[in-house]
């Protein structure tokens, strides 16, 4: 029974089990067993032994014992590695008395290496008759494993807090969690392969920056002692990737970690992963086509289908996807006209009528952003591009020539989640300076998420950046969609949590 609640919160039962395991470790060492070995070379994957089964075939396997069932001089056990699970058959007359005596000291959670021959039991279960066994690692704590009466499989680790804090136990106990993170890995590999095949190259940009830029967000700050200067953890790689466009790199992408000093929720983690890409001589229209093709192709590759299920909704990812002007969507879902021509006073009045909860100063940009997040996004279940954002919300995007108060920007929403942000990149250095000045004014009014003035970036633009389309894709949220998970913590191996002491105090 798994009853541990953390080092400081161990129950008496867990404490006793720990002491029992220490005693078993002591006995094994006194018997001359090496219980923490360096390696077990030439092993096969369990899945290989199972899938290429042949009666009497020899196999050399290693993994964790996830169950043990003793019958006198015979023991059945289940061994699991990263690829799968197989039953072990251990007999005293095969192993010998000394080796079988060590088997009696084994427990669930121990990691062992075994050699033997494959056969099928009378029930048809593929099994390894063990001829030799080596204890590779003795587990001193009992993992959350055991029989479930309902489905005859292993217990799952149900406590959500423990699953997030001790992800290693979650992965040991919950096959579904392992499946999610294997899916995540395949998705990232698929995105790389998609872009590589289309001539994009992968690059790396600084994670510590003298100025935070590329997104409206509060940064984390640290101090570099040798340089005696403050540095900021990256909120986005955008401004550095655009510098590479200036340098002549025309199709680039970065799978990057970003850090934003914001609240924690089911959709937000202060540290998260994004795919950001730029293509010279493209715009937001071609970027939409690329995103449609990339996400639908990824779904076919990793899921085998263009259909997903999220929060009870059956969603088709087959292109083409809807394209809806942002202000039109706001009018549809709120009844309010938040066009930039109306100005900030009209937007503030609309926010009051809608009872919008706007954090910080009630600027036009923040009001529109909150209206979209709270009233529009929840209704966007099928893949939908919201397009043509007010320039006030898009300080790095190019204006629509015939509608100068709007920008060539889109965001993609699926299942009520924002997944992609993209636009035609502003390459006019004079206009970019004006936009930064407006952002500086917003900061002076108390908007600490507004962009800072970046003189070096403007200088780079003055050397000439080609027209380009840029795309940012939230990897964590895309994994949420593909895996059907409603919390971002379920798709991040080690999500940020409150310190454990704080949780206990409450």
Image (cartoon, rainbow, N blue to C red):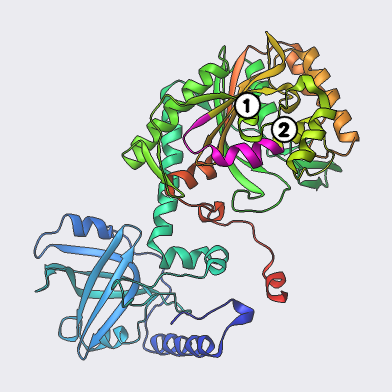
Q: In what element is the residue under mark 2?
A: helix
How many angstroms separate mark 1 from mark 2 (CA)? Answer: 10 Å
Circle 1 residue: 326
Q: Based on the displayed image, in which of its 4 quarters is residue 469 positioned?
A: top right
Looking at the rendered image, the quarter that the C terminus falls into is bottom right
Name the residue: 38% across, 61% down: 175
Res. 1 in view:
yes
What x and y, as percent, mark residue 9?
A: 61, 81
Q: Which residues are magenta?
A: 370-384
Front residue of 221/294: it is: 294
What x and y, as percent, mark residue 171?
A: 44, 63
**What mark, if any, has residue 229 been given in the picture?**
none
Name the residue: 45% across, 33% down: 192
Magenta segment includes 481: no
**What mark, if any, has residue 368 been given in the picture?**
2
Indicate left or right for 356 with 374 as reference: right
């Amino acid at each position: 029974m798994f009853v541990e609640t953390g080092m400081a919160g161990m129950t008496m039962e867990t404490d006793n089990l720990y002491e029992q395991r220490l005693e078993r470790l002591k006995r094994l060492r006194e018997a001359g067993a090496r219980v923490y070995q360096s390696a077990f070379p030439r092993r096969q994957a369990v899945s290989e032994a199972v899938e290429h089964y042949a009666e009497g075939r020899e196999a050399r396997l290693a993994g964790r014992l996830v169950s043990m069932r003793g019958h006198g001089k015979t023991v059945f056990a289940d061994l699991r590695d990263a690829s799968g699970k197989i039953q072990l058959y251990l007999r005293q007359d095969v192993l010998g008395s000394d080796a079988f005596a060590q088997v009696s000291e084994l427990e669930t959670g121990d990691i062992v290496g075994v050699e033997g021959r494959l056969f099928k039991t009378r029930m048809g279960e593929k099994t390894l008759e063990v001829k030799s066994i080596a204890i590779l690692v003795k587990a001193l704590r009992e993992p959350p494993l055991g029989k479930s009466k309902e489905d005859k499989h292993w217990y799952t680790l149900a406590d959500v807090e423990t699953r997030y804090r001790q992800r290693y136990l979650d992965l040991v106990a919950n096959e579904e969690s392992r499946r999610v993170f294997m899916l995540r890995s395949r998705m990232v590999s698929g995105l790389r392969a998609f872009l590589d095949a289309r001539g994009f190259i992968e690059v790396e940009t600084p994670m510590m920056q003298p100025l935070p830029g590329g997104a409206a967000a509060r940064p984390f700050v640290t101090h570099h002692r040798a340089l005696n200067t403050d540095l900021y953890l990256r909120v986005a790689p955008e401004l550095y990737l655009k510098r590479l466009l200036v340098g002549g790199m025309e199709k680039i992408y970065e799978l990057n970690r970003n850090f934003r000093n914001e609240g924690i929720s089911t959709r937000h983690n202060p540290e998260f992963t994004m795919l950001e890409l730029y293509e010279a001589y493209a715009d937001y229209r071609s970027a939409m086509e690329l995103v449609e093709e990339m996400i639908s192709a990824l779904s076919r590759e990793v899921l085998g289908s263009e259909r997903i299920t999220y929060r009870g909704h059956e969603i088709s990812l087959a292109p083409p996807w809807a394209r809806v002007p942002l202000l039109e969507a706001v009018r549809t879902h709120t009844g309010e006209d938040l066009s930039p021509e109306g100005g900030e006073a009209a937007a503030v009045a609309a926010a009051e009528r809608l009872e919008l909860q706007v954090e910080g100063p009630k600027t036009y940009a923040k009001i529109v952003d909150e209206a979209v997040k709270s009233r529009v996004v929840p209704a966007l279940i099928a893949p939908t591009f919201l397009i043509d954002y007010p320039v006030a919300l898009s300080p790095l995007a190019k204006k629509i020539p015939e509608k100068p108060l709007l920008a060539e920007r889109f965001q993609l929403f699926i299942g009520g989640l924002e997944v992609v942000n993209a636009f035609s990149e502003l390459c006019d250095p004079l206009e970019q300076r004006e936009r930064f000045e407006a952002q500086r004014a917003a900061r002076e009014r108390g908007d600490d998420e507004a962009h800072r003035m970046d003189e070096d970036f403007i200088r780079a633009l003055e050397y000439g950046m080609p027209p380009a389309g840029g795309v940012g894709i939230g990897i964590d949220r895309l994994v949420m969609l593909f895996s059907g998970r409603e919390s971002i913590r379920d798709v991040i191996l080690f999500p940020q949590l409150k310190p454990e002491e704080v949780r206990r105090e409450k």
